Image (spheres, rainbow, N blue to C red):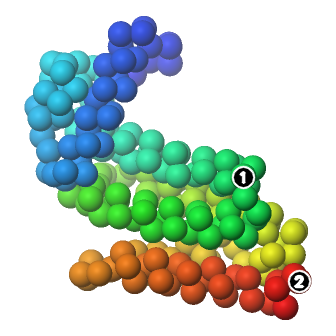
Amino acid sequence: MPSSRPLRADARRNREALLAAAREAFLADGDATVEEIARRAEVAVGTLYRHFETREALVAEVYRQEVAELCAAPARLLTHHAPDEALRTFLLLLVEHAAVGRGMGEALESIMATDSPVFDDARDEMARALDDLLAAGAAAGLVRSGISGRVVLRALGGICGLRAKGWKDDAVRIATILYDGLRYGAANHG
């Protein structure tokens, strides 16, 4: 179990290299081995296991990192865009996140069998991010009020969960329809 002490600079670099290599490997080949990931990170397999007790722990951390980056986007978007445009952009980022998740599908399946809370935590974080955007849009009169982030996430999750050819193009179209629906009936959009 990793300690709560801050990592030395070289250990931090190794950990970051492992996470970057794992993300790249999982996107390219969801079934990448720990040996392949260590090779890509230019560290020994033992170094990987010092940072991550199991392959599943590495997969979970890569996914947590992806979700954290995604959920940091609304604050940045709201500083540069009107709330409705920030919401539209974030909906498209959610579709892109689903594409990354699909690329990592095989790797993520390995943690589905564990009792890891990573997916529940991710859904909660994404719903909170959407709640913030929806509240900002409603306060500005640009988005209808009374819709929760969890509802929007469920609506988008249905199409993003399909494994049919062309799903991503369809998901972008549906995200646009969802966005239009969220603006319909808003104070400034009548």
For the residues marked 2 and 1, what is the alpha-carbon distance in whole angstroms? 22 Å
Say whether disc 2 or disc 1 marks the residue closer to the N-terminus. Answer: 1
The one of 47 and 10 positioned closer to us in this rendering: 10
Q: Residue at x 42, y 63 (%)?
A: 96
Point out the frontmost of discs 2 and 1: 1
**66 relative position to 73: left or right:** left
Q: Is residue 60 above or below residue 8?
A: below
- In the rendered structure, find residue 90 and report the number of the disc placed on it: none
In the image, residue 42 lies at what x, y percent? 18, 21
Q: Is residue 57 above or below residue 145?
A: above
Question: Pointer 2: residues within 10 angstroms few (<14), some, or many (20+)?
Answer: some
Q: Residue at x 38, y 40 (%)?
A: 61
Name the kind of residue labelled 1 in the image.
Answer: His
**Labels 2 and 1 touching (C-beta < 8 A):** no
Q: Residue at x 31, y 39 (%)?
A: 57
**111 relative position to 127: left or right:** left
Name the kind of residue labelled 2 in the image.
Answer: Ala
Mark 2 residue element: loop
Q: Quadrant of the N terminus?
A: top left
**18 relative position to 190: left or right:** left
**69 relative position to 16: left or right:** right
Q: Quadrant of the C terminus?
A: bottom right
Q: Residue at x 63, y 80 (%)?
A: 179
In the image, residue 47 lies at what x, y percent? 23, 18
Q: Is residue 77 above or below residue 95?
A: above
Question: Pointer 1: residues within 10 angstroms few (<14), some, or many (20+)?
Answer: few
The one of 40 and 34 positioned closer to us in this rendering: 40
Residue 1 appears in view: no
- In the rendered structure, find residue 80 and report the number of the disc placed on it: 1
Per the image, the residue denoted by label 2 is: 187
In the image, residue 30 lies at what x, y percent? 19, 53
